[in-house]
Image (cartoon, rainbow, N blue to C red):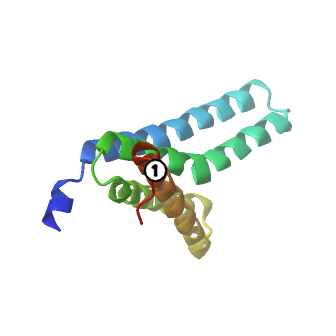
Amino acid sequence: MWHAVRSINSVAIAVAFFGCYILPLVIIWLIFETARAIVPSVTEGVALYIGLLGIWALFLGPVCAGYLVAKVAKALPLLHGLIVSVIGSALYVMVLVLGANIGGWSLLVVPVLLLAGLFGAWFYRYMSRGTVEL
């Protein structure tokens, strides 16, 4: 057990978390705010960016983070994918509870984020080894 704890690469987790959770959300949010400031009457474009933000936040970001952390860490890819997914889930639950004020409904994103991050790590493991080990 201690070998697994010592094998955790915190740099890989930080790179994947900021590169796949924080940075894309900030960029999409800046695009959204810029479009809203330039042409406030165009709601279709703003709705498109909100949709892109939601798709990235719930599906593509966690998969990308799981894949990236597994690729950078090399050792224990599924554990690293799980750790980055738990950190991302905590971030999203905090944002939803504090920002959207939806209470317990915010916990519904946790299974989606955990599974998406684990899928990204598993996909890297599958592509690097060529076989699936259960």
Q: Depth check: 119 or 10 in front?
A: 119
5 sits left or right of 50 in the view: left
Residue 119, image x, y percentages: 51, 56
Q: How many numbered callouts?
A: 1
Left or right: 134 as drawn, with respect to 30: left
**Compared to 100, does 29 lie above or below?**
above
- Residue 128: image quadrant is top left
Residue lying furthest top: 38
Between 106 and 42, the residue placed more toward the observer is 106
Residue picked out by circle 1 = 126
Which residue, as the protein is rendered here, is positioned at the far bottom? 104
Name the residue: 15% across, 61% down. 3
- Which element carries disc 1, helix, strand or loop? helix
Q: Is residue 16 left or right of residue 93?
A: left
User: 10 Å neighbourhood of mark 1: few (<14), some, or many (≥20)?
Assistant: few
The N terminus lies in quadrant: bottom left
- Give coordinates of residue 43: x percent, y percent: 84, 38
Give how far across and how far down residue 33 sits, in percent. Answer: 66, 33
Of residues 93 and 66, the one nearer the viewer is 66
- Residue occupying image coordinates x 14% and y 65%: 2
> Which quarter of the image is occupied by the C terminus?
bottom left
In x, y percent, where is residue 124?
44, 46
> Which amino acid is tagged 1?
Tyr
Q: Residue at x 37, y 47 (%)?
A: 70
Residue extending furthest front? 131
Judge from the rendering whether residue 58 lies leftward or rightward of residue 36; answer left or right: left
